[in-house]
Image (cartoon, rainbow, N blue to C red):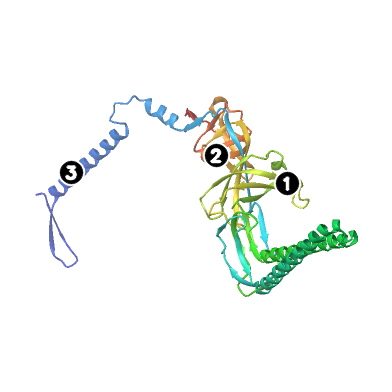
Amino acid sequence: MNRETTFDSSDTLIVVDRSRRRRTIIIGAVAAVIILAAAFFLMRGGGDEPAGAGAAGAGQGQVPSVTVVIPGRQSVDRAIAATGTLAARVDMPVGVAGEGGQVARVLVQPGQWVKAGQTLAVIERSVQSQQAQQLAAQVEVARADARLAQNEYERSEALVGRGFVSKADLDRKRAARDAANARVRVAQASLAETRARIGRLDIRAPAAGLVLERNVEPGQVVSGGSGALFRVARGGEMELRAQLSESDLSVINVGSPATVTPVGSTVTTSGAVWQISPVINQQNRQGIARVAVPYNQSLRPGGFASVTIVAGSQQAPLLPESAVLSDDKGNYVYVVGKDNKVERRPVKTGTVTAQGIAIAEGLQGNEMVVLRAGGFLNPGDKVRPQRQQQ
């Protein structure tokens, strides 16, 4: 019989069918063989690949493929980046031109546009007005005296031929007439002076522009020593006073185009260099280039801004940012050289444009430069270059 009897720990009889156990073992072994055979065929690719193909593919896969570019040489604008402070191109302080007094009215506010000669503030003038009226009356008195002196002279002149008036009396009449006319002119001049003083009590804009500051309030007593009561930017024109190194100042010219971007803003304003400092600061070896820009609401005097000045153009290789690497030794690129081996090439970068980075030194433009994955390479590595036209 194919049965086996045994007892467990509690003396219970257990009957085991040995044929069923043998069949289970055989089925498990066959399943394991089938699984191993399937895995073997899958690893060989179904058994259709030649015997040497696998070894060749493995050897080829150890050489990485890299994308390279031959940049050539392009015309690139030479741009100089700098920072500086915004200011009014012509900042006009406006104060008291006359004798001053108590401010009666202030007619403008900061940020307001004004015309040339427009009244900014009015000073109380009641006393000066009374003086003007008094002088106007004195002019009338002097004119009346002059008319009387003229009439007396004319009558004396008619009688001198008939012997009723001597020539000496006629000369005195002529002198009295001339003196009366002179007193009229003196009175008129005094009146004109007073009226001019009254006119100077109005604080006026010397030119059209934008009001930047107002430092006066109604009721305030001002005089010639009160300082600037208003500040006006002539024409609203602004400028950026950029700090540039000595070498950068030597390559820019008056009229060089520039773009100004205030800090914290994405708005750029086009302008041009209108003045270059004739001296260099001996402490920091820098000078100032003044960039004129038209009025823009984002440009506020006293603010900080960056500027890019175009100082001509140059022929240079242009590479994407992914091709230029850097470490503690400086900037460099990987060049595919002889036998497709990677070489490290130190470079000096130039202008950064929307198209890429200009290489000022280190490349001629006819090299095969690794475009991407340079960070995973080492000098001397062998690669398979795949050229990409830039």
User: In the image shown, does 124 or 234 lie closer to the viewer?
Assistant: 124
Which residue is labeled 2 in the image?
353
Q: Mark 3 or 2 closer to N-term?
A: 3
Mark 1 against mark 2, which lies toward the viewer? 1
The secondary structure type at the circle numbered 1 is loop
Near mark 3 (Cα within 10 A), the count class, few <14, some 14-19 or many ≥20, is few
Mark 1 is on which residue type?
Ser
Compared with 384, 36 (above or below) is below
Q: Position of residue 9 (x, y in %)?
A: 19, 66
In the image, 187 versus 275, the foreground residue is: 187
- Classify 10 Å Cα crowding around label 1: few (below 14), some (14-19), many (20 and above): some
Q: Which residue is mark 3?
A: 27
Give how far apart the Cα atoms at labels 1 and 2 are. 28 Å
Mark 3 touches mark 1? (CB < 8 Å): no
Q: Number of labelled discs?
A: 3
Among the two numbered marks 3 and 1 on one chain, the one whose residue lies closer to the N terminus: 3
User: Would you say 246 lies left or right of 350 here?
Assistant: right
Residue type pointed to by label 3: Ile
Q: Would you place residue 186 above or below residue 71 in this image?
A: below
Q: Residue at x 69, y 45 (%)?
A: 275
Name the residue rendered at 24%, 42% in the picture: 32
Label 1 sits on residue: 277
Q: Which of the two discs, 3 and 1, sits closer to the camera?
A: 1
Q: Secondary structure at mark 2?
A: loop
Q: Position of residue 291 (x, y in %)?
A: 64, 46
User: Please, what is the three-letter code of the amino acid marked with disc 2?
Assistant: Thr
Pointer 2 local density, CA inside 10 Å: few below 14, some 14–19, many at least 20: some
